[in-house]
Image: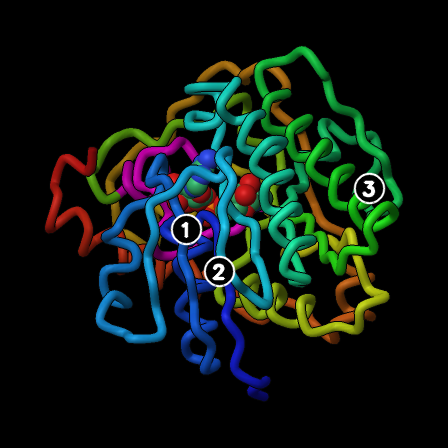
Amino acid sequence: MKSSRKKILVTGGAGFLGSHLCERLLRDGHDVLCVDNFFTGSKDNVVHLLGNPRFELMRHDITFPLYVEVDDIYNLACPASPVHYQHDPVQTTKTCVHGTINMLGLAKRVGARIFQASTSEVYGDPEVHPQPEGYVGRVNPIGPRACYDEGKRCAETLFFDYRRQHGLNIRVARIFNTYGPRMHPNDGRVVSNFIVQALKGEPITLFGDGRQTRSFCYVDDMIEAFIRLMRTSDDVTGPVNLGNPAEFTIRALAENVVRLTRSASALEFRPLPEDDPRQRQPDIGLAKALLGWSPSTELEDGLRRTIVYFEALLRERPTCS
Ligand SMILES: NC(=O)c1ccc[n+]([C@@H]2O[C@H](COP(=O)([O-])OP(=O)(O)OC[C@H]3O[C@@H](n4cnc5c(N)ncnc54)[C@H](O)[C@@H]3O)[C@@H](O)[C@H]2O)c1
């Protein structure tokens, strides 16, 4: 289903999810303004879009104000993996808070609808499984992950205050682990980590005993959910959990990756980092009801497509740094 042509801003558009979203919005016939400071994203992720006259790429840091005219805003800008968001934690909080204020201010000025890429990390290390949207979370405000977890929580607060105070048209998605082509090869995220290690024949590093569980959503399913959430009626604000409820242990994921890459890599166990959640599984009942959406890509299919991407990347850049 195609909607009428719009000018759409995607912040963090040169990142993993952002580049897939830009592609999809162009395919749907929209004009896309991709804004990114290239901290974790790269021009390589959108280079194939540069020839499209409806696509525009702008280097800009959203912690500074942005003056553009757009109909919709998808606010995805933010380093998303612990390695990257802990690299400069103050900048991470600034991106979440100042950046979000700037994007909400822009939405208010131009009357745009605005989407926030929030995260399952707002639930912290939860006592409730799976986590419904009404669960308020258990986050350590002074731990090393807090710059991201609390930053994203504050961004949600800002979204809802702009809604209450200024009547903004908002959508908040709480995204659970998503994977696919164009993930950063060495950002420490578990799927990309395992695939790169397996393809290089290096040991697969697992933290703890590997019995902690995660759910993994393939990127195409996630982007479909973003689009559906943005198209809902204006009384739908979220937060809405988006993810794949199928739960796997980290160990099972590692074993799948080794099998699919036909790698000889061995599994190697390391100590669990501080504040690492033991279990993470979305309750997507609300997304199913509101959006008529649930993920359709099997883990094995998604892994195969992601492996193809990393094989090509490693052929081009064997050190993958
Ligand atoms: N991928 C997931 O599993 C996942 C899960 C939960 C939430 N999210 C959220 O989705 C969004 C996209 O995540 P991703 O996985 O694509 O990560 P990513 O790191 O690939 O993309 C983030 C993009 O934002 C850009 N960026 C960072 N700070 C910026 C700033 N101050 N100004 C402008 N651009 C900036 C980066 O350069 C990068 O291109 C993030 O907000 C993240 O928190 C992702």
Marks 3 and 2: in contact by CB < 8 Å? no
Q: Residue at x 72, y 33 (%)?
A: 153
Observer-nearest residue: 151 or 57?
A: 57
Q: Earlier in the sequence, mark 1 or mark 3?
A: 1
Observer-nearest residue: 138 or 94?
A: 94
**Eyeballing the image, is 304 above or below 172?**
below
Q: Residue at x 22, y 71 (%)?
A: 51
**Eyeballing the image, is 298 above or below 306?**
below
Residue 193 painted magenta = yes
Q: Earlier in the sequence, mark 1 or mark 2?
A: 1
Q: Disc 1 designates what residue?
A: 35
Observer-nearest residue: 193 or 61?
A: 61
SS at circle 2: helix
Residue 138 visible, this angle: yes
Q: Disc 3 designates what residue?
A: 161
Q: Position of residue 235 (x, y in %)?
A: 86, 66
Q: Quadrant of the C terminus?
A: top left
Crowding at mark 3 (Cα within 10 Å: few <14, some 14-19, many 20+): few
Crowding at mark 1 (Cα within 10 Å: few <14, some 14-19, many 20+): many
- Marks 1 and 3 sit apart, C-alpha to C-alpha, by 24 Å
Q: Earlier in the sequence, mark 2 or mark 3?
A: 3
- Marks 2 and 3 sit apart, C-alpha to C-alpha, by 30 Å
Residues in magenta? 177-198
Q: Residue at x 69, y 72 (%)?
A: 293
- Specify whether tag 1 is near ligand 1 (CB below 8 Å): yes
What amino acid type should be assigned to the residue bearing mark 2? Val
